[in-house]
Image (cartoon, rainbow, N blue to C red):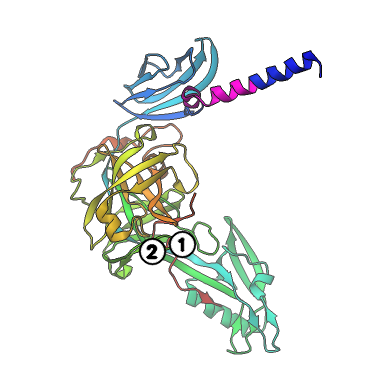
Amino acid sequence: MSTRERWRRAAGLLLVVLILAVSATPEFRAFVTLPDHLRLPQGYAHELSLGLPFSKAVQTAGGTGLSLAGSGAPLQLAAEQTGRYTIDVKLFGLIPIRRMTVDVVPQIRVVPGGHSIGVRLQSDGVMVVGFAAVRDEDGQVQHPGRDAGIQLGDTILAIDGRTVRGEDHAAHLFQEAARKGRPVTVAIRRNGERIERSVQPVKEKESGRWRVGLYIRDGASGVGTLTFYHPASRKFGALGHVIAENETKKPFEFAEGLITAADVVRIQKGKRASPGEKITKQLESGPRLGIIEKNSRFGIFGRLSGAVRNPLYPEPIPVAMASQVKEGPAEMLTVVDGQKIERFQIEIVRLMRQPTAEGKNMIVQVTDPRLLSETGGIVQGMSGSPIIQDGRLVGAVTHVFVNDPTRGYGVLIEWMLQEAGILKAETGAADPRGTVSLPGGSSVVPGNSNEAVTAICVHT
């Protein structure tokens, strides 16, 4: 090997070592984690480290409602007026290396939840949640529905032109049509599109009934926790995660939905590899609280019939944007007995500030000795339990770690407010009514009891 080649290799190795050394510094990590988009409540001051030396932040658009002071260690942002602002980070004050959008929004106040709620969804038509083999009169196994092209997650809207009104009605229509000895025309909805399939029912050998080999379901129900109530708009948010089908894992499509008050009668304690749950009275017996309008990855949302009260926080409290949430002590509100809302100590141990699928923006750990003693940590039914830090609502519990019930995931309240329409995604603005203040690895499973569904399947 020539001397020149050795020097070239040595220089390459030195460059690699230098890059690795720089990338391991806190300053570089601060730079690469700079957000592209930042929301700040009006009147809030925020510290932001630009990370790289010789860098400077320059406001390039938006007016004078956002003031900048200091250099990159740290940069002081003062959100004085609502609006959208653009900040360019420049090396040596000349070379643009990063652009950030800052939305200053009105301060939003909500009543924190913690109330145990029953959740009930009713679909328009019936959803296909499974296939069943049908043994015909000759002893042959057939799958008529599947062979006709019907898929898991399809919603059956009509049978032979007659609108389906529920599980029993669908079974009746299939029987009635099959006795005529001809294929049945089934109208289904798949991914928002209405299509038709022709199914030939098979007469089952044992029962003598006509079958199409489908398991169907027309509703979903479960137990969760209310996260917030926005008095000015009467909007609520709960659960912090989507309600999905057990079998298909797809979001449950519904025509009507409501939440009811739920009494917790006992707790099945959680332990490693066996998540616990809240045991409640029959959901149908609870008073109706409101209607569900949306089922999304960040929870369920709708409007309450009337105001709700939280005795721990009789007045609405401010909400925190993602930039205001920090790792450290916090409290969780939930019910472990009857309808009594209680506060329990937790720790926010890790933050992932960008929105992610299923609302897993933070990892929390239960530290409250009493809650650990009574429940083992996070149990099913706690989904939506509000997380409060420094007097602000910062998020909600969503999932529990199967192998460690003391820990779980949470969603930032910013994304729930955006999903509810209280915080507008397009402009970063808040609902103008939001400024009104009125008195008042491990695997994980959803913290909501029976998140998917608890309804009985009907085999048709």
SS category of the residue bearing label 1: loop
* Number of numbered discs overlaid on the protein picture: 2
User: How far across and down, in percent of the image, does residue 10 sit?
Assistant: 70, 18
Circles 1 and 2, Cβ within 8 Å, touching? The answer is: yes
Could you tell whether 170 is left or right of 69 in the image?
right
Location of mark 2 (residue): 222
What secondary structure prevails in the magenta region? helix
**Can residue 14 be seen by looking at this rendering?**
yes
User: How far across and down, in percent of the image, does residue 57 sit?
Assistant: 45, 16
Residues packed near mark 1 inside 10 Å, few (<14), some (14 to 19) or many (20 plus): many
User: How far across and down, in percent of the image, does residue 173 sit?
Assistant: 55, 78
Location of mark 1 (residue): 452
At a point 60% along the width and 90% down the height, the residue shown is: 206
**Can residue 114 be seen by looking at this rendering?**
no
Q: Is residue 93 magenta?
A: no
Residues packed near mark 2 inside 10 Å, few (<14), some (14 to 19) or many (20 plus): many
Lower position in the chain sequence, tag 1 or tag 2? 2
Q: Residue 56, relative to residue 262: is it above or below? A: above
Which contiguous range is marked in magenta?
A: 15-31
Report which quarter residue 22 is drawn in: top right
Q: Is residue 23 magenta?
A: yes
Q: Residue 23, relative to residue 7: is it above or below? A: below
Towards the viewer: 20 or 389: 20
Residue type, numbered disc 1: Ala
Give the distance between the C-alpha atoms of the residues marked 1 and 2, in whole angstroms.
Answer: 8 Å
At a point 47% along the width and 29% down the height, the residue shown is: 35
User: How far across and down, in percent of the image, does residue 249 sit?
Assistant: 53, 59
Q: Which mark is residue 408?
A: none
Report which quarter residue 75 is drawn in: top left
Towards the viewer: 246 or 427: 246
Residue type, numbered disc 2: Gly
At a point 18% along the width and 50% down the height, the residue shown is: 311
